[in-house]
Amino acid sequence: MRLSPTSAGAVIAPGAVWIDKGEYEWAVQEFEEGLRRQPTNPGVLNAVAWKLATHRDVKIRNGKRAVELATRACEATEWKDGAMTDTLAAAYAETGDFEQARQWQEKALKAPGVAPGDQDGMRRRLQLYRERKAYHEK
């Protein structure tokens, strides 16, 4: 965090620490503080959206906010980053909009530069969305 204080990882790290401690309200406050400090950083937008869409604990998840943040991340990267559209798909699934989730996941899979290892996870999530299930981290 000291070496790269504005990186997405450093900005969301305080919230992740609170999650590990089970202090979800503090975690969300830290995520929002990170967004306040870096409101246009697509990496920060994406990282927070991913947590809000996919966290294993329902106390963290907020699909509507995740869609908002993931959309902003996609706009900032001109809809060309597969990781960002992957997050948008997960966010839509969390809101129960599995058609949008499926469409965005398919676009994520076609995005240039997506690593083969990442494609495996994307394919598994696509299958979940086809089954009308959201993806939550274990």
Image (cartoon, rainbow, N blue to C red):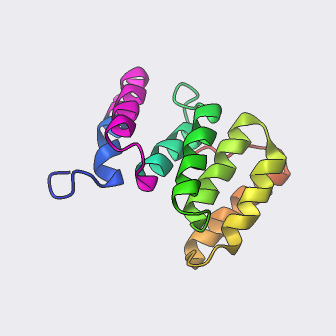
Q: Is residue 30 visible?
A: yes
Place of residue 110 in the rendered image (x, y in percent of width and height, measured from the top left): 70, 74
Give the mark count: 0
Residue depicted at x 79% and y 49%: 100
Q: Nearer the viewer, residue 75 or 89?
A: 75
Q: Is residue 102 magenta?
A: no
First to last magenta residue range: 18-43
Where does the C terminus fall, quadrant-wise?
top right
Place of residue 130 in the rendered image (x, y in percent of width and height, measured from the top left): 84, 53
Q: Is residue 138 visible?
A: no
Residue depicted at x 60% and y 39%: 68
Direction from residue 114 to residue 4 in the image, left or right: left
Q: Nearer the viewer, residue 108 or 132?
A: 108
Residue depicted at x 47% and y 42%: 48
| In this view, 93 is above or below 126 | above
| In this view, 125 is above or below 55 | below
* Chief SS of the magenta region: helix
Place of residue 90 in the rendered image (x, y in percent of width and height, measured from the top left): 66, 48
Direction from residue 104 to residue 69 in the image, left or right: left
Q: Is residue 22 magenta?
A: yes
Residue 35 quadrant: top left
Direction from residue 41 to residue 137 in the image, left or right: right
